[in-house]
Image (cartoon, coloured by chain):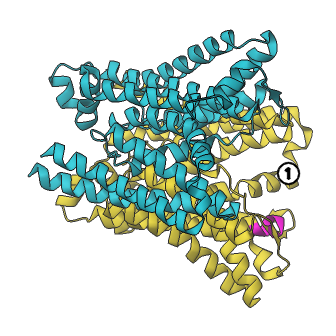
Amino acid sequence: MTMSTAAAPARPRRAMDSLTQRYLVLVGLIVIASVGFGIANENFYSLANIGILLRSIAVLFLVSMGMTFIMLTGGIDLSVGSNVAFAGGVGVIALTATDSAALGFVAAILAGMAIGAINGVFIGRLRLSAFMVTLATFALARGLALVIYDADSINVSNAAFLWLGGQSWGSLPVVIPFVALVFVALSVLLYRAPFGRDVYAAGSNFNTAFVLGRMPQRTLVWVYVLSGALAGLSAIITVGRVSSGQPWTGLYLEFDAITAVILGGTSLFGGRGRLLGTILGVLLYGIIINGLVLTGTNPYLQSLIKGLILLGVVLLDTLVQRRKAQ
Amino acid sequence: MPDLSRVMRERNIIFVTLALCLVFYLISPRFLSLDNMSAISRQIVPIGLIALGQFFVVVSGNIDLSMGMGSVLFAIVLGVFFGLTGGVALGIVAVIVCSLALGFFNGVLVAKLGLPAFIVTLSMLFSAQGLSGLIIPRGQQIFLMGDFFRFIGAETFLGLYWSFLFLLALFALAWVVYNHTSWGAAVIAVGNSEENARLAGVNVDRVKIGVFMVSGLCSGFAGIMLSSRMGFVQPGLDGNGLLLDGIAAIIIGGTLILGGRGTIGGAFWGLLFIGIINNALNLLNVEDVWHQVFKGAVILAALGANWLLWQSRQVEAH
């Protein structure tokens, strides 16, 4: 990993050190949060409960990894939550129409990639601002999901389709090793493949990357398609978890993903950050959110807390960076 | 020839809007009835206020995602003060103070700390949503009754709703401010290039804080108008729909989303366009589930058109 990070352009050694420091802080916070919730709730440490926790944030892991790629290029994707609902809808419809789980999987992932491609073309090729374009697809994909489902949920009983999201080996949900697998694959893509260097290059300096012939426009299209594909996978897991497809699933998921990625040390301005940080960010954020749910916190208080966490992290980052710059 | 292209741009959206009216009239003659027209004029008031505030923010090169949920929060603030005092004066003062404070807070974080506007206002969106549900528990409502709400929500003058006249007056004021004051010029300058604006002696930070205070105040007004029209407030109001409609209106109106360009007239026609679409979807009995699809598609199409404009701007610059 050291070798590949050295090969990534425009990443000074110092930045890597500060990222490592951050990961240590995150690990510390995760331990503290687990101990805290463990004291508050004696079931917290049971194996089953850890499985439940990890399963409930599996989707957040996937979506956040896609968001990491996007934010490394300096973009943002506000449409992933809606996309999860839309892709799930397409997958469930394909499944019920053909009764083939494989076709359902493919349909869901292709649907997610389609929304991603719209984002990618508007943002990468037309160079429109990411939050505007993805705000439009945020509405579009949710609307399409509502149309597909006719604003109602559809039950799914196909065992093969539900396997990924619903099955457990003992107290280990199948989805956990799957997420780990995706993490390894994406790490290889980001750190070992030319595409990963293009991602860092596009986010560090778009114009320089362009002049160097790295075709950042194309890179941008592909990161959004990748995020869409991960949204499609998330859709399959979501459907599997609850044995039904629901039009309002994934509401504000993008917000959780953005917060977790920023928490994991990925810069809002692109070019700096790593997947490991995102994993730690999702873990910490997931433990907090899950703790709030388990303790029965008022949902509106939860959204206030989420808003303040995001603002707090961004503020803290900026202030720390300012102090370093001085 | 910036003036010519400006007129052309507005003419396009005027043409499209009028053509749309004709189409809807042919489908359903009721569309152009006086009743329906005045219904549209009342429906677009909160969207128009959001669009107006967002216009200045976008021209300055930023975005305010907190406007929709902000107006829900301010509607609830008004409702709570109404419930406590039975009057509206104190509530309106509170809304104005709170909305200016929210805008100031957004503006300071964006201008002084250099944080991206969409992150700051996204977190404010959630905070506002959370706060509104904490002030009034879930599932509860506060009913707003009295002369003031009837006046704002239902009284007319020469056949036009007072709320619509208020909106028109604000648009006129905004037109004067945008086109004929140094502040308006400063907003455009900041949107075009912060660096150049700074070199030209513009206090960039102050302009940014200013545009966010304007958008904050506009969402406060939108909250007042929304609650008066509905006659009640509750935390479940669709703030995000309001936000999307407002943004759609100004993009359709030819406001350059990269900042530095746009016209108040264009924004107004964009608003009429959105109002007409919303109304027609209801009038033609289009199922609710399709509404969001239309919104998203319309914004995407407008973004594409916006891109074409941007291309022509590149050509002009050469």
**Residue at the image position 66 percent from the left and 10 percent from the top:** B89
Q: Quadrant of residue A1?
A: bottom left
User: Is A179 situated left or right of A137 in this image?
Assistant: right
Where A25 falls versus B272 (above or below)? above
Where A105 falls versus B115 (above or below)? below
List x then y, in percent, for residue B173: 38, 24
* Circle 1: residue type: Asn
Asked if residue A232 is among those painted magenta in the image, a careful observer would answer no
Q: Which of the pair B243/B281 is nearer the observer? A: B281
Can you tell which chain is drawn yellow? A
Q: Where does the magenta region start and end?
A: A239-244
Residue A76 seen anywhere in this rendered image of the structure: no
Secondary structure found at label 1 = helix
User: Is B120 situated left or right of A44 in this image?
Assistant: left
**Residue at the image position 71 percent from the left and 39 percent from the top:** B237
Colour in which chain B is shown? Answer: cyan
**Residue at the image position 66 percent from the left and 75 percent from the top:** A90
List x then y, in percent, for residue A174: 76, 69
List x then y, in percent, for residue B199: 15, 24
Tell which subunit mark 1 falls on: A
Where A326 falls versus A159 (above or below)? above
Please tell me whether the stretch drawn in magenta is mainly helix, strand or loop.
Answer: helix
Q: Which of the pair A244/B235 is nearer the observer? A: B235
Tag 1 residue:
A49
Classed neighbour count for the residue bearing mark 1: other residues with Cα under 10 Å, few (<14), some (14–19), many (≥20): few
Residue projecting furthest to the left: B318
